[in-house]
Image (tube, rainbow, N blue to C red):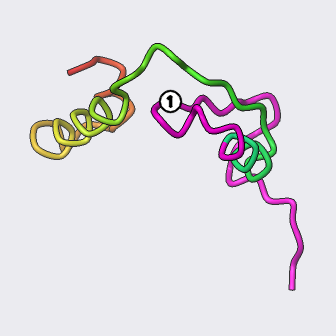
């Protein structure tokens, strides 16, 4: 059996930015940092980030399915 560490496609120098309610839980942040082996930053200015993510996904799937999801998010809804 192979043993880690695995980085899940992220490169050294990248970082994980977390938002929402779970980002206030230091234990969850430690697990995220350990799993991704990256620094974790909390973006506190996004109280409704889950709702915004859902809106982007809905817009992407319903209105712009032929455009890349990254481009949809870049342009905004």
Left or right for 54, reference 29: left
Q: Is residue 43 above or below residue 57?
A: above
Position of the N terminus, as image quadrant, is bottom right
Q: Nearer the viewer, residue 10 or 49?
A: 49
Left or right for 69, reference 2: left
Residue under label 1, please give it: 19
Position of the C terminus, as image quadrant, is top left
List x then y, in percent, for residue 26: 70, 37
List x then y, in percent, for residue 75: 29, 17
View extreme (bottom): residue = 1
Q: Nearer the viewer, residue 35 or 29?
A: 29
Which stretch appears magenta? Answer: 1-28
Q: Secondary structure at mark 1?
A: loop
- Residue plotted at (18% across, 42% down): 58
List x then y, in percent, for residue 70: 39, 32
List x then y, in percent, for residue 20: 45, 32
Left or right for 26, reference 75: right
- Residue plotted at (29% across, 29% down): 52
Q: Tell whether position 51 is magenta.
A: no
Q: Nearer the viewer, residue 7 or 27?
A: 27
Quarter-wise, where is residue 15 in the image?
top right
Left or right for 26, reference 69: right
């Amino acid at each position: 059996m192979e043993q880690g560490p695995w980085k899940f496609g992220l490169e050294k120098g990248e970082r994980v930015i977390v938002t929402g309610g779970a980002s206030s839980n230091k234990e969850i942040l430690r697990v995220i940092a350990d799993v991704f082996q990256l620094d974790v930053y909390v973006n506190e200015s996004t109280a409704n980030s889950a709702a915004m993510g859902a809106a982007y996904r809905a817009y992407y799937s319903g209105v712009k399915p032929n455009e890349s999801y990254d481009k949809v998010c870049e342009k905004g809804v």
